[in-house]
Image (tube, helix red, strand yellow):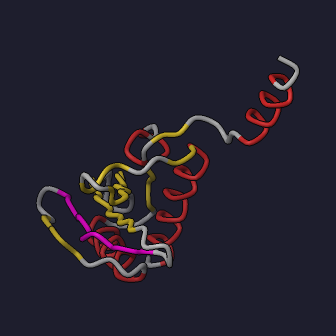
């Protein structure tokens, strides 16, 4: 019992909040309005994929879909991870376009590829970085 309190303090100090997947981030965090025409915004999304080293897997400009291929990474321990982005692009008017991103982050396990967990703060930064890259391409 005398070790329980120090253990709980250590445990709570090391915890970084609840873990989520990149897809479970609230929609407003995954959505931004760009001050650009539909064509320019669509091109900026594709250019952002390329700038970050993603291939383009699927494009349908008529319905506003731009999906990257998976980008895989690993580390010296042999752990593999991969990520992918999907963008829904909607024309608001002639000078504004809404972009909604959905990121997929996965880790390879013995049973195959599974959703990777991360803190909500890290997931929010992931989307903020993605939108920053898109805006740089405008």
Residue 80 % position (x, y): 38, 68
Q: Quadrant of the N terminus?
A: top right
Q: Which of the pair 100/53 is nearer the observer?
A: 53
Q: What stretch is highlighted in magenta?
A: 64-74
Which residue is rendered at x = 23% and y = 64% of the image? 67
- Which quadrant of the view contains residue 51? bottom left
Residue 58 colored magenta?
Answer: no
Residue 7 % position (x, y): 79, 31
Residue 51 appearing in the image: yes
Residue 74 % position (x, y): 43, 74
Which residue is rendered at x = 78% and y = 27% of the image? 8
Q: Which of the pair 80/54 is nearer the observer?
A: 80
Q: Which residue occupies the extreme top position in the image?
A: 1
Residue 73 colored magenta?
Answer: yes
Q: In this view, does 103 lie above or below 4?
A: below
Q: In which quarter of the image is the C terminus?
A: bottom left
Residue 96 % position (x, y): 39, 58
- Which quadrant of the view contains residue 88? bottom left
SS assignment for the magenta stretch, majority:
strand
Q: In this view, does 74 lie above or below 105?
A: below
Which residue is rendered at x = 42% and y = 73% of the image? 78
Q: Is residue 130 left or right of residue 85?
A: right
């Amino acid at each position: 019992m005398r070790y329980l309190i120090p253990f709980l303090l250590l445990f709570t100090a090391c915890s970084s909040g609840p873990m989520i997947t990149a897809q479970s981030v609230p929609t407003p965090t995954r959505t931004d309005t760009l001050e650009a025409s539909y064509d320019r915004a669509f091109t900026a999304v594709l250019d952002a994929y390329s700038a970050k080293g993603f291939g383009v897997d699927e494009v349908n400009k008529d319905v506003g879909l731009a999906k990257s291929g998976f980008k895989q990474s690993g580390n010296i321990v042999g752990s593999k991870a991969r990520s992918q982005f999907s963008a829904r692009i909607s024309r608001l008017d002639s000078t504004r376009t809404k972009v909604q991103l959905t990121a997929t982050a996965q880790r390879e396990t013995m049973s195959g590829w599974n959703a990777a967990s991360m803190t909500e703060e890290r997931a929010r930064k992931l989307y903020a970085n993605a939108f920053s890259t898109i805006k740089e391409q405008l």
